[in-house]
Image (cartoon, rainbow, N blue to C red):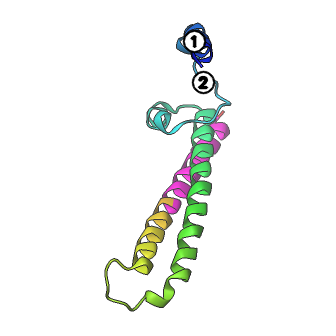
Amino acid sequence: MRVHLKTALVIMVASLPLQLGAVPQKASEPLTAREVQKAEKEAKTAADHLRLAAYYRSEAQQVQKKLADSEDSMKHWSWMETWTKTPNPYWSAKTQADGYRAKLENANKLAADHERMAASLQASR
């Protein structure tokens, strides 16, 4: 057991310089949630806007799946719609679905805006 622990520790320490010297992301790599805010401020080229649009489309797909799950929960608990007892699983699922719908609309709007900006930048060349 100790041999495995020591081996793992040696490998981890040996790879530390590689992790610390990580290269910055290339333009073709997808954005992470942390990088979006910075990228929003610094987006100047069509490629920057297309990259942001791809991020927002990806977010929209993820939220769409969550929305479908919430709507399934609403259907499952629909027989409790008129109940006044709280917490009510139907109303919880409905509130969650409403939140996901708003996130989905926002992500689609932001993606469309960035696609429009990229198209106008490409047309102005």
Image quarter where the C terminus lies is: top right
For the residue pair 55 and 92, the one nearer the viewer reads as 92
The answer, for residue 120, to whether it is visible in the render is no
> Looking at the image, is 89 positioned above or below residue 1?
below
Q: Which amino acid type is shown beneath numbered disc 1?
A: Lys
Q: Secondary structure at mark 2?
A: loop
> Looking at the image, is 39 positioned above or below residue 59?
above
Q: Which amino acid type is shown beneath numbered disc 2?
A: Gln
The Cα atoms of the two marked residues, 2 and 1, are separated by 32 Å
Residue at 53% from the left image edge and 57% from the top image edge = 109
Magenta stretch prevailing secondary structure: helix
Name the spot of residue 35 as percent of width and height, x first.
Answer: 49, 33
Which residues fall within the magenta stretch?
104-124
> Looking at the image, is 121 positioned above or below residue 68?
above
In the picture, the disc for residue 25 is 2
Residue at 64% from the left image edge and 24% from the top image edge = 26
In the picture, the disc for residue 18 is none
Name the spot of residue 119 as percent of width and height, x first.
Answer: 64, 44
Q: Name the residue carrying label 1.
A: 6
The answer, for residue 122, to whether it is visible in the render is yes
Query: Circle 1: is it few (<14), some (14-19), or many (20+) Cα within 10 Å?
Result: few
Q: Secondary structure at mark 1?
A: helix
Residue at 38% from the left image edge and 80% from the top image edge = 88
Query: Circle 2: is it few (<14), some (14-19), or many (20+) Cα within 10 Å?
Result: few
Name the spot of residue 118 as percent of width and height, x first.
Answer: 61, 41
Q: Quadrant of residue 32?
A: top right
Image quarter where the N terminus lies is: top right
Name the spot of residue 28 as percent of width and height, x first.
Answer: 68, 30
Specify whether residue 3 is painted magenta: no
